[in-house]
Amino acid sequence: MYTFRRRRKKRDTLLHRYGSQMGRISAETARAALKETQAANRAIREGEEKLRMQANYDSLTKLPNRTLFMDRLSHALSRGRRDKSQVAVLFFDLDRFKKVNDTLGHNAGDKLLQQAARRLTDCVRETDTVARLGGDEFTVILPDLHNTHNTELVGRKLLQRLAEPFVIDGAEMLVTGSLGITVFPDDGEDAETLLKNADTAMYKSKEGGRNTFRFFTAKMNAEALEYLELENALRHAIEREQFILHYQPIIDLKTGRVTSAEALLRWDHPERGIVAPAEFIPLAEDTGMIVPIGEWVFRTACDQMKTWRDIGLSSLHVSVNLSARQSRDISFKDMIHRILKETGADPKNITLEITESLFMEEDHRTLAILSEFRTMGINLSLDDFGTGYSSLGYLKRFPVNILKIDRSFVVDIGKDTESQGLVEAIITLAHSQNMKVIAEGAETEEQVEFLRSRGCDEVQGFYFSRPLPAEEFAAYISAQAAA
Ligand code: C2E
Ligand code: MG
Ligand code: MG
């Protein structure tokens, strides 16, 4: 503080001294003055930066300290209130850290804290905050959440990362942590309360046997347990042959004939019965399990197409849903090529349904792969169109040739003129880009007639049929052909 003030004073006298000589001074003196002033300014900036660091950051780990943590938490809560999003606070305490300090010395303890800090930071997004409150206590803020299961995944990842062996001064050591989780707005409205609740939850996980996590509320603990069970069951679902594909017919509105089938995944759970994709696809995406599951779906759909071809349904196309996480997988492109080769499926009879989320992050690699697929003849359709950022700009940039109007617009046909107008606009827009339009979720004759009259190419919905098991699907087509 002292040197910093003195420097500021020095700069002022310098300015004064050289300033009063203005008009008489040589260019050289002016340059020297300028240099000195710049150096003094730099020193002030450095001093200020140092102060800011001291006030807000922990000197050992370079993580935000309690002050900055509380400040960021308050900001995150304001945003949460405004955007109606959740904010999770994780309270993390190393198990038996005191023992490390006592047996190996403080120096080793410090190194352990530094390494632990780095590991914790590696596990979270850039927008999350990892702070050190003091001692062996760390806290994490996960802002902008829309589903608490992600919190649990982060929590588990933190514990796992920490449980990997540490190497301190050449010696390997195992350290675990206990984690308490609390969530805004359910568990508390303000920063203090949330921090206190996270601390309480952390003590519960210490009591629960360490190296584990607890939520602050019993309800959330029960949900977490259920989710964990679901995840474990999902891990075995492929090998236990619990997945099935159902197929929903897509009908050409001009000819009335079935042109293709959308493959929709079902999980036949031994206790729960048939589980809908909405209940497990997000989990599969979060955990990366969507990669092997997606491969199973693609292979099964291609095999099915072969079976249908063998019974004379050779022109039937199959549509497969693709999640963004799957397409970013390093082996995605090879997987598609390999299965096409192994099953002998014709790329022209295949459609990959993608959603806009795939394009949210400018992912050039995925874009290039999809363009290549398009060149091979694979069809690409933009699913759930109208629910995201849907714009003409998007359509022009992405190699899609089919557009699927989301069910939420189709439902309103006949009820809401605005949605009706949107449906018309989307059809015109798609046609102007030489794209085929499919409407999803038609349930009434009125909706189908409206879509037909506005030039929509194809339609899919309960009005024609629900998604069906493969044999029933073939029977449906035969019945149609006979009619
Ligand atoms: P989606 O691709 O938009 O699929 C259409 C969904 O709308 C299906 O739900 C279908 O059963 C439902 N649907 C169709 N017609 C009607 C109708 O007339 N009325 C109503 N109320 N619903 C209708 P489902 O099978 O539950 O699938 C939901 C979502 O799960 C799918 O939406 C898709 O995003 C995802 N999904 C399904 N299978 C897979 C898969 O194999 N991989 C991936 N990544 N996602 C999948
Ligand atoms: Mg779809
Ligand atoms: Mg859809």
Image: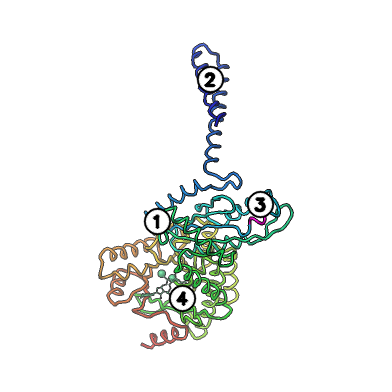
Rendered position, 312 above or below 449: below
Magenta part of the chain: 97-101
Amino acid type of the residue that numbered disc 3 sits on in the rendered structure: Gly
Residue 197 x/y as whole percent: 47, 59
Q: Quadrant of ligand 2?
A: bottom left
Front residue (pair 310, 143): 143
Residue 307 image offset from top left, x and y in percent: 52, 83
For marks 1 and 2, give the CA distance.
52 Å
Whether residue 229 appears in magenta in the rendering, the answer is no
Can you identify the residue that label 2 sits on?
Answer: 14
Q: Nearer the viewer, residue 477 or 235?
A: 235
Numbered badge on residue 264: 4
Q: Secondary structure at mark 3?
A: helix
Task: Give the numbered dot on residue 109.
Answer: 3
Most prominent secondary structure in the magenta stretch?
A: helix
Residue 285 picture location, percent across and down: 51, 67
State yes or no: Cβ of the residue under disc 4 lies below 8 Å from any atom of ligand 1.
yes
Which of the 4 quarters of the picture holds residue 382?
Answer: bottom left
- Secondary element under disc 1, as helix, strand or loop, is loop
Mark positioned earlier in the residue sequence (3 or 2): 2
The colour scheme is rainbow
